[in-house]
Amino acid sequence: MKKQTKAYLFAGAAVLCWSTVGSAFKLSLREVDYFNLLFWSVLVSLLVFVVFISLKKQWVLIKQQKTRDIFRSAFMGLLNPFLYYLILFQAYDLLLAQEALTLNYLWPVVLVLLSIPILKQRIGFLSIIAILVSFAGSFVIATGGNILDFKFTNTYGVILAVSSTIIWASFWLLNVRDKRNETVKLFMNFVFGFAFVAIYGLITKSIKLPEINGIIGVTYVGIFEMGITFFLWMSALSLSETTAKVSNLIYFAPFLSLIIVNLTIGEEIRLATIIGLVIIIGGILLQKGNKK
């Protein structure tokens, strides 16, 4: 099998996994609260990383880290998984799955905006237009299509969903500067992230053992949202002839997610959601075309 074919298979598997998480979040939140979804799913994902590092015999790389690497991982773990998923799960708890998952796809737009102060990059006029287009799409989704009434379906939930994109984009921009092995970085981030989650849970006395359906939910989220999917995507990127050949596949994920949300949890997909998502993706593609 050709390397590029393998890359497409890995990328397709990652996209399929990511397409199910919107439904998985909502179904899991029926069984556990947003904090316990965070606590137990991060624990599961940490165990997944332990297995991968053991299979790849990379524990020696963990031992070779310097003090500044440890502090960097602590800060990155604070951003993701702790703050990012704490905020994202609350957003899913308050919004329809279709609203939360589509608003979350604003993160590539936020990535461009944050690259100005963090990476000292400049953006041109067409990039600004692309950003405005994507934000217009998010506005359509957040208002449920009631643009003239200017009324959000759930203001706090929308704020949380958009805030999560800022944290996610910041995490990946800072991650670019970290030249350590990707698996090692993810593992260390989740070690510290879980520590922050556990401390938060002990202080607030929020940690509870889920019932069987809840255990199934948090295990699925831990494996397919936070765990194995990262490795599938990294494998796809490393095998692909160019990043673009596989990265464009990610835009299938939100549309597949909407179909799965409709089939699994019975949400009727609103026309405003579809229109808003198309506008967001259009803005992102315009931005990518401008880069080329």
Image: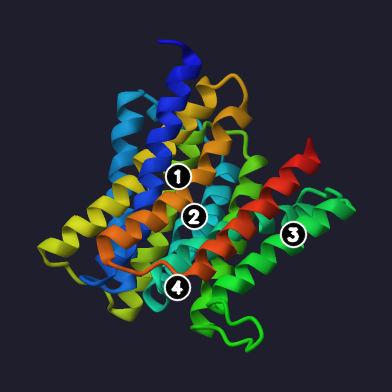
Q: How far is mark 4 from mark 2, CA to CA?
A: 20 Å
Location of residue 130 by image quarter: bottom right
Lower position in the chain sequence, tag 1 or tag 4: 4
Residue 136 in the image, given as x and y percentages of width and height:
68, 68
Tell me the amino acid under the disc marked 3.
Ile
Circle number at residue 91? 4
Q: How far is mark 1 from mark 4, CA to CA?
A: 26 Å
Looking at the image, residue 71 lies above or below residue 98:
above
Looking at the image, residue 219 lies above or below residue 10:
below
The one nearer the camera, 204 or 273, is 273
Tell me the amino acid under the disc marked 1.
Met
**Residue drawn at (73%, 53%), measured in percent from left and top?**
112
Looking at the image, residue 41 lies above or below residue 248:
below
Residue 227 in the image, given as x and y percentages of width and height:
36, 44
**Residue under label 3:** 131
Circle number at residue 188? 1
Residue 78 in the image, given as x and y percentages of width and height:
51, 60
**Residue drawn at (34%, 51%), measured in percent from left and top?**
20
**Residue under label 2:** 77
Lower position in the chain sequence, tag 2 or tag 3: 2
